[in-house]
Amino acid sequence: MLNPLLWEIGHVAWFMENWVFRRDGAPSIVDHADELYNSATVAQETRWDLDLHRRATTKRYMQDVLDKVLTLLDSPTLTSTDVFHIAYSVGHEQMHDEAFTYTLQWHGWSAPPGMLTPEGQVRALEARDAGPALGDVAFSGGPFQLGASRDETFVFDNEKWAHEIELAPFAMARAAVTQADFAAFVDDEGYARAGFWCDAGRAWKADRTHPVMWRRTGNTWEVRRFDNWRPLHPHRPISHVNWFEAQAYCRWAGRRLPTEAEWEYAASMHDGRKWSRPWTRARGELNTDWDAMGCVDVGAYEPADAEGCRQLMGNVWEWTADAFGPFPGFTPDPYADYSVPWFGDHMVLKGGSWATCENLLRTTYRNYFLPHRNDLFAGFRTCACT
């Protein structure tokens, strides 16, 4: 379930205020803040029915909190604990920035104003008609440090800390599964063939026959982009599919999802060294930060290749085979609800989407959602079965 946009704005302001300025129990600067915006105590299914502050009041709350943070950053009283919570809150806000965008997409509402022409139409995607990126890339595997290095300035608790694992050799697809690839699965009655689906996937799909953002028009498929329907674009990645759909496609194709460790290895290893942000070698050549205002061809952004794999960062989030869980020696950060409640039944996604803030991303960053969620800018790539 997605949140009301007005609630999300208030929640972002509340989170920053709560963790930076109210750790000692001080009251909020806005009335009823805890009763409205504390995600740990305000059930998600009730948020659409809350008597929220008006938009002007909510935006003023956000501005007032921001002004206080900027003042604190220039203050001699700033502590390392303050810096940690400010960094944490900025990362949290960037996650909600993406949520604002995929909420508009999910409901079929108009695109954000920056994505609209003066006539109110969704802007055409920046020209990145680069076609496919075919084949697999072979990786030798071996000893690998999975997780974040202690040298990082800031990471979330579930990334801590790097620990050695042993990876068998594997071969990963050069690019994410495309819309044309997935259309072949759909047209082969992939949704109707029970053997491709796990038990929970069969229960989820019921009588579904295609991805949620698709519709058949005559003999062709169309894909919805906000409130506009466009013809399927064969070389752009499949998006808005969940873990069940990704797994079913892999079974149909005789492939498998990569493990989290395989994905991180492919994205981060270069010249025998692990990089947390390898794309800095390519001067930021990623489809993130609303750069192209949508997904581009999977063959685009070649300069940011990670050892031959294209777009491991950006374009669409990518499902992995693994459930979200703690690394050895895990201890929660002060905001314990960030990771702990979701261990076990959520699945790991990696890499970010076109609507993800680039400075949030690292190769060790772990996104995680329930396997039925198909409201995200999420697709997947595959590995060869050994």
Image (cartoon, rainbow, N blue to C red):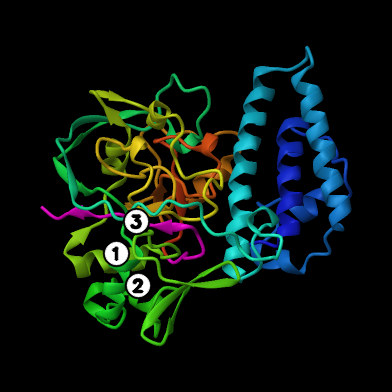
Residue under label 3, please give it.
380
Q: Nearer the viewer, residue 131 or 97?
A: 131
* Main SS class of the magenta portion in the image: loop
Magenta region, residue range: 372-386
Of the residues tagged 2 and 3, which is closer to the observer? 3
Disc 1 target residue: 247
341 part of magenta stretch: no
Q: Residues within 10 Å of mark 3 (few under 14, many from 20)?
A: many
Question: Which residue is drawn at the image coordinates 44% and 50% (left, top)?
Answer: 315
- The relative height of residue 5 versus residue 265 in the rendered view (above or below) is below
* Alpha carbons under labels 3 and 1: distance apart: 9 Å
Q: Where is residue 30 in the image (x, y as percent from the top left)?
A: 88, 46
Q: Which residue is drawn at 34% across and 65% down?
A: 234
Nearer to the camera, 164 or 59: 59
- Residue type at mark 3: give it: Phe
Q: Which amino acid does label 1 sit on?
A: Gln
